[in-house]
Image: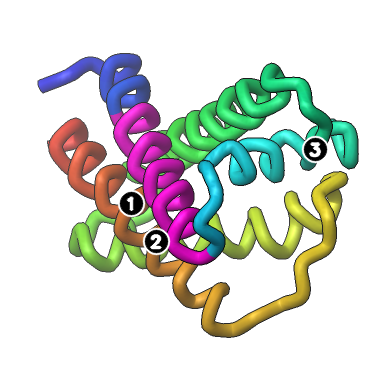
Amino acid sequence: MMNAAKTIIVTGLIAGSLDILTAFTDYYIQTGKEPEGVLRFIASGLLGKDAFTERMIVAWFGLLFHFIIAYIFTLVFFLLYPKIKLLRINIFLTAIIIGMVIWIIMNLIVVPLSNTPEIPFNWIKSLKAMLILMCMFGLPMAILFKKHYN
Protein backbone atom coordinates (compact mmCIF):
# COMPACT_ATOMS: atom_id res chain seq x y z
CA MET A 1 0.00 0.00 0.00
CA MET A 2 1.29 3.45 -0.93
CA ASN A 3 1.45 6.31 1.53
CA ALA A 4 -0.77 9.36 0.95
CA ALA A 5 1.87 11.52 -0.77
CA LYS A 6 2.89 8.75 -3.16
CA THR A 7 -0.76 7.95 -3.95
CA ILE A 8 -1.45 11.62 -4.76
CA ILE A 9 1.71 11.98 -6.89
CA VAL A 10 1.11 8.77 -8.84
CA THR A 11 -2.62 9.38 -9.30
CA GLY A 12 -2.14 12.97 -10.45
CA LEU A 13 0.56 11.92 -12.89
CA ILE A 14 -1.49 9.06 -14.36
CA ALA A 15 -4.79 10.96 -14.54
CA GLY A 16 -3.18 14.17 -15.80
CA SER A 17 -1.17 12.28 -18.43
CA LEU A 18 -4.12 10.23 -19.68
CA ASP A 19 -6.28 13.35 -19.86
CA ILE A 20 -3.78 15.49 -21.78
CA LEU A 21 -2.83 12.66 -24.14
CA THR A 22 -6.51 12.14 -24.93
CA ALA A 23 -6.91 15.89 -25.51
CA PHE A 24 -3.91 15.83 -27.88
CA THR A 25 -5.33 12.86 -29.78
CA ASP A 26 -8.81 14.36 -30.04
CA TYR A 27 -7.40 17.72 -31.16
CA TYR A 28 -5.30 16.04 -33.84
CA ILE A 29 -8.25 13.98 -35.09
CA GLN A 30 -10.49 17.08 -35.20
CA THR A 31 -7.99 19.54 -36.72
CA GLY A 32 -5.00 17.61 -38.07
CA LYS A 33 -2.81 20.00 -36.06
CA GLU A 34 -0.02 19.38 -33.56
CA PRO A 35 -0.92 19.19 -29.85
CA GLU A 36 0.81 22.49 -29.16
CA GLY A 37 -2.55 24.19 -29.83
CA VAL A 38 -4.09 22.41 -26.84
CA LEU A 39 -1.27 23.60 -24.58
CA ARG A 40 -1.52 27.17 -25.87
CA PHE A 41 -5.27 27.15 -25.21
CA ILE A 42 -4.62 26.00 -21.63
CA ALA A 43 -1.95 28.68 -21.20
CA SER A 44 -4.37 31.30 -22.53
CA GLY A 45 -6.42 30.82 -19.37
CA LEU A 46 -3.79 32.87 -17.57
CA LEU A 47 -1.91 34.57 -20.40
CA GLY A 48 -4.83 35.50 -22.66
CA LYS A 49 -4.10 36.23 -26.32
CA ASP A 50 -0.35 36.29 -25.64
CA ALA A 51 -0.49 32.49 -25.38
CA PHE A 52 -0.97 32.27 -29.14
CA THR A 53 2.34 33.96 -29.99
CA GLU A 54 5.26 32.15 -31.57
CA ARG A 55 7.16 31.60 -28.32
CA MET A 56 7.42 27.85 -27.63
CA ILE A 57 7.75 28.45 -23.87
CA VAL A 58 4.02 29.24 -23.79
CA ALA A 59 3.17 25.62 -24.65
CA TRP A 60 5.30 24.48 -21.72
CA PHE A 61 3.36 26.85 -19.46
CA GLY A 62 0.16 25.23 -20.73
CA LEU A 63 1.48 21.81 -19.77
CA LEU A 64 2.51 23.11 -16.35
CA PHE A 65 -0.92 24.72 -15.80
CA HIS A 66 -2.62 21.47 -16.87
CA PHE A 67 -0.72 19.44 -14.30
CA ILE A 68 -1.23 22.03 -11.55
CA ILE A 69 -4.98 21.77 -12.14
CA ALA A 70 -4.76 17.96 -12.33
CA TYR A 71 -2.95 17.81 -9.00
CA ILE A 72 -5.39 20.21 -7.34
CA PHE A 73 -8.31 17.97 -8.34
CA THR A 74 -6.36 14.87 -7.30
CA LEU A 75 -5.65 16.31 -3.86
CA VAL A 76 -9.24 17.51 -3.35
CA PHE A 77 -10.79 14.18 -4.33
CA PHE A 78 -8.18 12.25 -2.32
CA LEU A 79 -9.20 14.20 0.77
CA LEU A 80 -12.95 13.89 0.03
CA TYR A 81 -12.85 10.18 -0.81
CA PRO A 82 -12.95 8.84 2.79
CA LYS A 83 -15.48 11.48 3.87
CA ILE A 84 -18.15 10.96 1.17
CA LYS A 85 -19.67 7.50 1.30
CA LEU A 86 -21.06 7.82 -2.26
CA LEU A 87 -17.49 7.89 -3.60
CA ARG A 88 -16.74 4.51 -2.02
CA ILE A 89 -19.73 2.53 -3.32
CA ASN A 90 -18.40 1.55 -6.74
CA ILE A 91 -15.35 2.61 -8.77
CA PHE A 92 -17.44 3.26 -11.89
CA LEU A 93 -19.88 5.46 -9.99
CA THR A 94 -16.90 7.26 -8.45
CA ALA A 95 -15.37 7.80 -11.90
CA ILE A 96 -18.65 9.22 -13.20
CA ILE A 97 -19.01 11.58 -10.22
CA ILE A 98 -15.40 12.77 -10.43
CA GLY A 99 -15.63 13.34 -14.19
CA MET A 100 -18.90 15.26 -13.93
CA VAL A 101 -17.72 17.41 -11.02
CA ILE A 102 -14.45 18.28 -12.79
CA TRP A 103 -16.33 19.11 -16.02
CA ILE A 104 -18.79 21.33 -14.14
CA ILE A 105 -16.07 23.18 -12.22
CA MET A 106 -13.84 23.65 -15.25
CA ASN A 107 -16.52 24.56 -17.79
CA LEU A 108 -18.94 26.54 -15.66
CA ILE A 109 -16.50 28.29 -13.29
CA VAL A 110 -12.79 28.14 -14.19
CA VAL A 111 -12.85 28.60 -17.98
CA PRO A 112 -15.49 31.38 -17.96
CA LEU A 113 -13.43 33.28 -15.36
CA SER A 114 -10.20 32.77 -17.31
CA ASN A 115 -8.75 34.57 -20.33
CA THR A 116 -9.32 31.70 -22.79
CA PRO A 117 -11.03 32.50 -26.08
CA GLU A 118 -14.77 31.97 -25.89
CA ILE A 119 -15.95 28.72 -27.46
CA PRO A 120 -19.64 28.28 -28.27
CA PHE A 121 -21.38 25.56 -26.27
CA ASN A 122 -21.86 22.25 -28.09
CA TRP A 123 -23.70 19.34 -26.42
CA ILE A 124 -21.83 16.63 -28.35
CA LYS A 125 -18.40 18.09 -27.55
CA SER A 126 -19.43 18.63 -23.93
CA LEU A 127 -20.61 15.04 -23.51
CA LYS A 128 -17.40 13.77 -25.13
CA ALA A 129 -15.33 15.95 -22.78
CA MET A 130 -17.29 14.64 -19.79
CA LEU A 131 -16.75 11.02 -20.86
CA ILE A 132 -13.04 11.68 -21.32
CA LEU A 133 -12.84 13.11 -17.79
CA MET A 134 -14.76 10.15 -16.39
CA CYS A 135 -12.52 7.57 -18.09
CA MET A 136 -9.12 9.24 -18.10
CA PHE A 137 -9.34 11.17 -14.86
CA GLY A 138 -12.11 9.70 -12.75
CA LEU A 139 -11.36 6.01 -13.29
CA PRO A 140 -7.66 6.13 -12.34
CA MET A 141 -8.59 8.20 -9.28
CA ALA A 142 -11.34 5.79 -8.27
CA ILE A 143 -9.08 2.75 -8.64
CA LEU A 144 -6.02 4.19 -6.91
CA PHE A 145 -7.95 5.88 -4.10
CA LYS A 146 -9.89 2.67 -3.39
CA LYS A 147 -6.60 0.77 -3.31
CA HIS A 148 -5.07 3.35 -0.98
CA TYR A 149 -7.97 3.59 1.47
CA ASN A 150 -8.59 -0.17 1.60
- Judge whether 17 appears above or below 23 on screen: above
Q: How far apart are marks 1 and 2 (CA)?
A: 6 Å
Q: Earlier in the sequence, mark 3 or mark 1?
A: 3
| Position in image of residue 16 (x %, y %) | 42, 36
State the residue at coordinates (67%, 61%).
Answer: 107
Marks 1 and 2 in Cβ contact (< 8 Å):
yes
Label 3 SS: helix
Q: How crowded is mark 3: few (under 14 residues within 10 Å), some or many (20 or more)?
A: some
Label 2 SS: helix
| Position in image of residue 53 (x %, y %) | 83, 31
The residue where tag 1 is placed is 136
Q: What predominant SS class does the magenta segment belong to?
A: helix
Number of numbered discs on residues: 3
Q: Which of 50 and 145 is in front in this view?
A: 50
- Quadrant in the rendering for residue 7: top left
State the residue at coordinates (67%, 23%).
Answer: 61
The residue where tag 2 is placed is 132
